[in-house]
Image (spheres, rainbow, N blue to C red):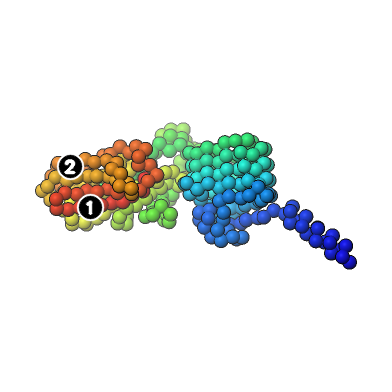
Amino acid sequence: MKKIILLIFIYCISLTAIWADEYNTNDSGEWQDDVWDETTEMPLEFAQNENNLVFNIHEGHTIELPEGDTIIFNGNNLEFNVYGEFIVKGHIELAGNNTTLVINGFLTVDGSINFDGNNGEIEGDGVIDGDGDITGDYEKSDDINNALPVSLLYFKGNIYNNKILFEWATATETNNNYFIIKRSKNLSQWTNIDTIKGAGDSNIKIKYQYKDKNPIQGLLYYKLKQVDYDGKYEYFKPIIIFFENGVNNQLYIKHIFIDKQTLNLQILNKTGFCANLAIIDLQGNLLNYQKIISFSNIQYITIDLNGDYFNTVIVINLFNVVSLEQKKLIIN
């Protein structure tokens, strides 16, 4: 009897060693949020003896690894299945051997992924995009589509008669079904504004326009989502517009919008005094300063953005001897 119990005990230990720990998403969120069934906070490092791990990001769920965060997988035989969307803004270090990424949904790499172990693989028939890098010892399936079917030339917005006019253009389109314009006040919660039909297939430049007739007050982020006939999609970089209607201050920033690498300000000055414009970061570093001599009601200021502005929060200060106006926005 003791021998049977001992054999059962050894058998259970063997199964524990062979069976993988499997993690499944139950919602969208950041990597360490409470969005996994098996844990309330997913760690950022896994030990060498944690082998055969399986991660499943399910369809309809979006998981983001924020910029500055690093995940390290030290164990072997990792399997990572992306059926929904995985956005990597930080870094993933795959230190173990025989790691397999199965991309049947969408993997956006704006940070980096490194296969530091041996015999890595990327499989599936999904989409990989982004401005980051995937490096190391791995092979990639030919079914993975790295290039989505629209070449966007620009996406910009301007304010006319208390409405926001959006304009964008494509150089080429393949299998393009439609665009969605999305709006947010905080870069995390987005609202669909409208859907605009795409051109399908095209090898010539096509221009699009859309007017937001009911913009909300304050600092707004807009981004463009492109969807093809197969349901695959990509997001383009958001633009920033400050919309304020009916303000009666004598000195204030009426509108803010960013076009590519240019910050555009529309300033109203009725005080009769010169004004000063100073842009600082949250640490108090002065990024830009200029004196505004004009006393005209409306003045347009253009500032070239450089590396000092990217991926940071800036505060725009407009002030003179009688008034002070401040606006905070995120540049990414």
Q: Residue furthest top?
A: 203
Q: CA distance from mark 2 to mark 1?
A: 14 Å
The x, y position of residue 91, in whole percent, is 52, 44
Label 2 amino acid?
A: Ile
Question: In the rendered view, would you say 166 is above or below 188?
Answer: above
Residue at the spot x=52%, y=37% of the render? 133
Q: Are marks 2 and 1 in contact (CB under 8 Å)?
A: no
User: Tag 1: residue type?
Assistant: Glu
**332, 308: nearer the viewer:** 308
Mark 2, secondary structure of its residue: strand
Tell me what residue is drawn at x 22 percent, y 57 percent.
246
The reply, left or right, for residue 326 in relation to residue 130 is: left
Q: Is residue 111 visible?
A: yes
219 lies left or right of 76: left
- The answer to whether residue 26 of the structure is visible from this angle is no
In the picture of the structure, the residue carrying the numbered disc 1 is 325
Q: Residue at x 28, y 43 (%)?
A: 286
Q: Bin the neighbour count of mark 1 within 10 Å (Cα to Cα): few under 14, some 14-19, many 20 and up.
A: some
Q: Residue furthest left?
A: 272
Tell me residue 73's x, y (percent): 61, 46
How packed mark 2 is, by other alpha carbons closer than 10 Å (few <14, some 14-19, many 20 or more), is some
Residue 210 percent coordinates (x, y): 36, 47
For this rendering, which residue is in front, 288 or 196? 288
Find numbered disc 1 in the image and state the secondary structure of the residue it sits on: strand
Quadrant where the image shows the N terminus: bottom right
Query: What residue did someone put label 2 on?
Result: 292
In x, y percent, where is residue 100?
65, 43
Q: Quadrant of residue 293?
A: top left
Mark 2 or mark 1: whose residue is earlier in sequence: 2
